Image (tube, grey):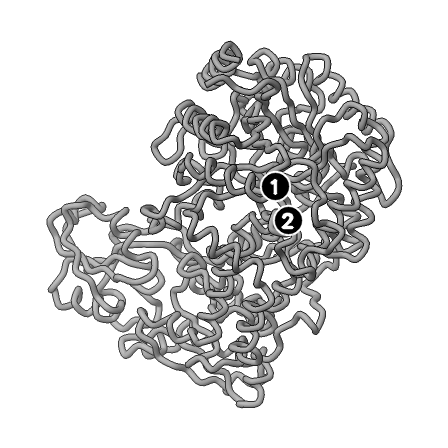
Amino acid sequence: MALPNGFLFGTANADHQVEAYDPDREDVWDLWERYQGLTPRGRATDFWNRYEEDIAAAASMGCRLFRFSIAWARVETSAGVFDEEALAHYRRVAECVRSHGMKVMVTLHHFVWPVWLEKHHGGMIGEKFPDLFASYAAKVADTLGDLVDWWITFNEPSQLTFGYIRPWWQNRYYMPPGLPRGTEVEAEAEAVGKLVPNLFRAHARARSRIKARNEAAKVGVNPLVTGFPTWLQMLMDWGACHRGLSEAVFKFTTKGALVSERGEVDLVIGGITEGDQTRFEFSDPYLRTGKAVLVLEGYEGEGLNSLAGKEVGVLGIGNQPASWKRDLPAQARKKVFANYDEARNSLAEGKIHAVYGDAFFLLPFELKDRERFRFLATGLSDEHYVVAAPHGHGRLMDRVNRAVALFQHDLALACEVPWISQPEQVAKDAQRPLSLHEVFVGGDSLPDSMSSGRGVRRIRRRGKIRIGIRKDAPGVSHSCEKEGLELRLARRIALEVLGDESKLEVEALDPCERLEVLQSKSSWLNWAWRFWGTTSLIANANWWYLGTSGRLPEELCPAEAIGAQDFVGLDYYWGLPTWRLHRFRLLEEAAHGRFLRAPVWPQGLFHALQRFHRWFPDQELLIVENGCVPSADGMTRGDYIKAHFAQVERALKKGVPVKAYNYWSITSNREWGHAFDPNTDFGLLFVDLDKDSQLTRVKTAEAKIYRELIEEKSVQR
């Protein structure tokens, strides 16, 4: 079909993802990457120095729109203090875009903000944030406002909430700033309740300041829209509009019970790795070990291949099935046991040939007749054990971590063998701060209003701490009556919490029950709140436009933000139709930066365009971002571009006034702490960020496909 006159094809990038790291102008993501052990941006693509090359490449493809972002930390070095040279640099970038015959789109806040804002003013939930942001926007508008055609105040505002609430699939915050260790779910809700109206206020005030300088300026945002079926989208919209009701119901059912709800035990020790579950708090690691294979001393054969055709005992809990399927020969006959005692006894009686599992539990130092056994293989994996508690037990977990640190010298004997060791590097990694608050204050400082101390108080009132230990652990097992490391750690914890290591009540647990005994009504409601909160308020980016269209409660969207936009922007990447909703977890793959497996549903873009046109019939729509890694969900990047643009044409035929289609991104770039590989490379121009010191731009096949698409559609006008 012939596109309307004035339709724009474009491409984009963002400051933190393409500009080289500047130690004198750090932003919060620089700190986050460093303290969370993520991949730092390093030189990125060095766009700061090579912007002319990338802008020229976009123009050569036929693009008539180029989007870039301003690094707030570079232009405002402290509150009210601006770097005029940095501002002049961004003006030169905008002039370069104009010189190539392209329109200019500028983003003011692409997930990053200055360290000083977070450290001294409370960041985006601070009282001064809306006005500080508006002042920054005004200064940028003074410098290059005459060159900018479209302004984006906040890139994907829905994603910013992940800095204040942990999604259900992980125990750490997805992005900065995070909340202090021990923060309860109610405090997370309170933080989001401050963030959302602050974003609306900041946007509205920034827009007013920009338009005061140029009344014709077009200012908006670009929420990240996930494609869901219409019926589910309507349900999520209802949830966002009725936040007060859902929050009240949650508080009614869990108030006073979130932490103090009685589980069978307070803590669980025993072969738990942090990857086992996502509904619990975990301590720093106390032991490092790995998978191994145990055989009798007289076993004839060496190496894992000798187990082909033989019967091998395995366990069916936690990460065991995935591990033995990975490590054992396919021809080995697996027999599943409930615990290590049963498996080892079967081996001793000659009923099986070997046992696969964790080296520490396969052959404990305290085991009777230990000399009868030997390892056929060790070091098949690298894992660390942690102590588990329900979410919300922050203060209790602080004491557990102190006990773990004091416990390390008890591992001296165990560290004499290669398959068991102190988790030095793993522990160092696990002790990373949970939030930037901890970085700034130098510890786990936490205001009492946000702290969970009820769990500790309940234990003290009881006079004993209840700790579950798996029944095949040394000191609990009949095969290993001598006290083992788990029991010694439990006593250390009792000493730390109650001042007396004898005030310990041990519950012997079947391995399959290790985490179930921690579950209670509150822990399940905690998880349910996260799930519903993520889908109805966070994953559902509609809440931004529900706000500006006047559909949200005023507590979430203040009156000054209603109608405060000049166009409808959106980002669209992934989606799931009704018949694929059972694959909802594929969206988690995208959240973890594994975009090769992200679910592709082009029709979701059409539905989003139609929906927003109904809400704002008099405003033009711009697809600010749409793009793909080399392939996703079985679809190549080239086919992805064609399929999604076909949905844009479909919307245009229905009368939806789509103004622009922007492909993300012009080059490879850093993807927010994720490793650089095909999972995270959206670039039309490939740049080997890790291995090519010259950062050479190499055209991909999709660069040609995009150029040909633009040429074809331009001819048809």
Residue 419 image position (x, y, % from top left): 38, 55
Q: Position of residue 373 (x, y in %)?
A: 23, 62
Quadrant in the picture for the N terminus: top left
Circle on res. 549: 2
Q: Which of 550 and 483 is in front in this view?
A: 550
Front-most of 187 and 697? 187
Kind of element beneath mark 2 = loop
Q: Nearer the viewer, residue 145 or 95?
A: 145
Which of the 4 image quadrants contains residue 107?
top right
Q: Which amino acid does label 2 sit on?
A: Ser
Q: Where is residue 313 in the image (x, y as percent from the top left)?
A: 20, 60
Horizontal arrangement in the rendering, residue 506 relative to residue 691 (left or right): left
Residue nearer the viewer, 134 or 513? 134
Query: With respect to residue 487, does 294 lie above or below?
Result: above
Side (left or right) of 565 relative to 419: right
Residue that lies at the very extreme toward the bottom in this rendered image: 462
Q: Does 31 appear above or below 179?
A: above
Whether pointer 2 and pointer 1 mark residues with C-beta atoms closer than 8 Å, the reply is yes
The residue drawn where x is 64% and y is 52% is: 547
Label 2, label 1: how far apart the Cα atoms are: 8 Å
Quadrant in the picture for residue 456: bottom right
Locate residue 432 relative to residue 531 in the image: left or right: right
User: Three-letter amino acid code at disc 1?
Assistant: Phe
**Residue 20 position within the rendered picture, expressed as x and y whole percent measured from the top left:** 68, 29
Give the numbered dot on residue 616.
1
**Residue drawn at the location 86% of the way across and 31% of the way down:** 142
Q: Which residue is drawn at 57% across and 41% down?
A: 673
**Taking 689 as reference, is 101 left or right?**
right
